[in-house]
């Protein structure tokens, strides 16, 4: 019964996730993240700190832990990735105050330490690629995956200005669904370069959600080898034991 309950809970979770994805813009893009790509993690950390950390904290990650895991020195982190004056051993917080956040966004932007564990890496990657200009929104931006998002596109300087191409109006509501997105004014990066940038940010956020995953993956190989060796030794012991019993 316990197994059946767990299976039912798992299936229910999948159904809820599928419903959420459908209501937030449809199919997800494949992020292609790789936690073993240290260069991608380093680039993602730099991009996140420059474009995202002004509003979004990573309160479950410390600068010192990030430096150790990503192969960075204390000087590199404090000079290039720390913009709040925090100490090397402190968590990654923001300098944005709740009063300013309420004034500009209506609420305090969420901490993103666990965003990939809650939403998934593909969702984050798709979200970063789905912003478009919308004069009807308070900040002038909207998002195809997450309609009426309350944040602007933090990466517009890299991507450029993206507009939506709308489909036919819905006969019931009259709403016009976003059919496609098109960059009408290029930014600093071309299309592939921007996808690489958003993939790097997603990879970094995936790491931030579970820093231990880096060491766990490296230890996993040794654990498998140990289990194989143990199984082989156990087989030899079993064979030797039953040989005496049979005789």
Image (cartoon, rainbow, N blue to C red):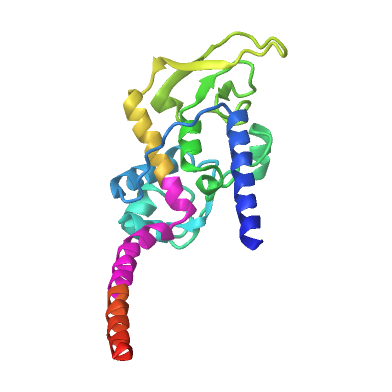
Residue 196 lies in the magenta stretch: no
- Main SS of the magenta part reads helix
- Asked if one can make out residue 125 in the rendered structure from this viewpoint, the answer is yes
Residue 14's image quarter?
Answer: top right
Q: Residue at 63% of width from left, 26% of height from top?
A: 148
Residue 221 lies in the magenta stretch: yes
| Viewer-side residue, 160 vs 181 | 181
Label count reads 0
Q: Is residue 208 depicted above or below 202 in this figure?
A: below
Q: Position of residue 60 (x, y in %)?
A: 52, 57
Q: Position of residue 156 (x, y in %)?
A: 45, 25
Task: Name the quarter where the C terminus is drawn.
Answer: bottom left
Q: Residue at 51% of width from left, 25% of height from top?
A: 131
- The residue range painted magenta reads 204-229
Q: Is residue 229 depicted above or below 59 in this figure?
A: below
Query: Which residue is farthest right?
Result: 172
Residue 21's image quarter?
Answer: top right
Q: Residue at 41% of width from left, 58% of height from top?
A: 213
Q: Position of residue 196 (x, y in %)?
A: 34, 34
Q: Is residue 60 depicted above or below 168 in this figure?
A: below
Q: Residue at 62% of width from left, 29% of height from top?
A: 23
Q: Position of residue 127 (x, y in %)?
A: 51, 32
């Amino acid at each position: 019964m316990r197994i059946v309950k767990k299976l039912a809970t798992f299936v229910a979770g999948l159904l809820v996730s599928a419903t959420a994805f459908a209501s937030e813009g449809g199919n997800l893009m494949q992020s292609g993240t790789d936690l073993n790509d240290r260069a991608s993690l380093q680039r993602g950390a730099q991009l996140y700190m420059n474009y995202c950390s002004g509003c979004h904290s990573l309160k479950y990650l410390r600068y010192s832990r990030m430096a150790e895991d990503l192969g960075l020195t204390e000087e590199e982190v404090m000079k290039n990735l720390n913009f709040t004056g925090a100490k090397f051993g402190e968590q990654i917080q923001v300098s944005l105050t709740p009063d300013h956040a309420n004034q500009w966004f209506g609420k305090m932007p969420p901490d993103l330490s666990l965003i990939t564990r809650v939403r998934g890496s593909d969702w984050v990657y798709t979200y970063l690629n789905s912003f478009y200009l919308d004069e009807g929104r308070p900040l002038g931006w909207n998002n195809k995956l997450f309609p009426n998002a309350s944040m602007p596109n933090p990466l517009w300087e890299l991507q450029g200005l993206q507009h939506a191409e709308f489909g036919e109006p819905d006969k019931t509501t009259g709403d016009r669904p976003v059919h496609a997105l098109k960059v009408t004014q290029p930014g600093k990066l071309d299309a592939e370069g921007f996808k690489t940038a958003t993939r790097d940010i997603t990879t970094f956020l995936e790491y931030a959600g579970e820093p231990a995953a880096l060491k766990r993956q490296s230890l996993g190989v040794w654990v498998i080898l140990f289990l194989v060796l143990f199984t082989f030794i156990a087989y030899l012991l079993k064979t030797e034991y039953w040989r005496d019993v049979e005789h």
